[in-house]
């Protein structure tokens, strides 16, 4: 299972990871990411959230 995650970074420097939805396959997740036009985000395995191996949005922000 994969989570569609939206990265939101604020002007004050703080960032958040917002889970938009959960999908059975990575292909479904990528399809809906494109359909919803999410550019600052990605599809990640749910195990990363559960096991605590999640990397915060700051590492993925491009600004």
Image (tube, helix red, strand yellow):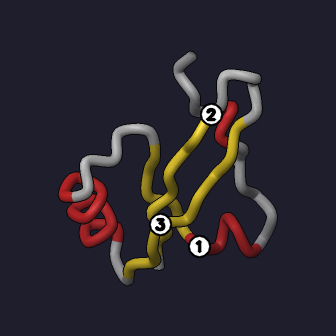
Decide which of 3, 8 is in the foreground and name it: 8
Q: Is residue 1 above or below residue 38?
A: below
* Residue, disc 3: 20
- Decide: few, some or many residues near mark 3? Use Cα within 10 Å; few <14, some 14-19, many ≥20: few
* Residue, disc 1: 46
Mark whose residue sits in front, 1 or 2: 2
Residue that lies at the very extreme toward the right in this rendered image = 52
Label 2 and label 3: CA atoms lie apart by 16 Å
Determine the residue positioned at 44% across, 58% down. Answer: 43
Q: Is residue 62 above or below residue 24?
A: above
Residue that lies at the very extreme toward the top in this rendered image = 63
Which badge, 3 or 1, comes first in the chain's sequence? 3
Which badge, 2 or 3, comes first in the chain's sequence? 2
Q: Circle 2 sits in a helix, a strand or a loop, which is it?
A: strand
* Residue, disc 2: 9
Q: Circle 1 sits in a helix, a strand or a loop, which is it?
A: helix
């Amino acid at each position: 299972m994969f989570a569609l995650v939206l990265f939101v970074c604020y002007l004050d420097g703080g960032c958040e990871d917002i889970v938009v939805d959960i999908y059975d396959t990575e292909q479904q997740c990528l399809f809906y990411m494109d359909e919803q036009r999410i550019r600052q985000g990605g599809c990640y395995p749910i195990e990363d959230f559960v096991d605590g191996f999640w990397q915060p949005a700051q590492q993925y922000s491009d600004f």
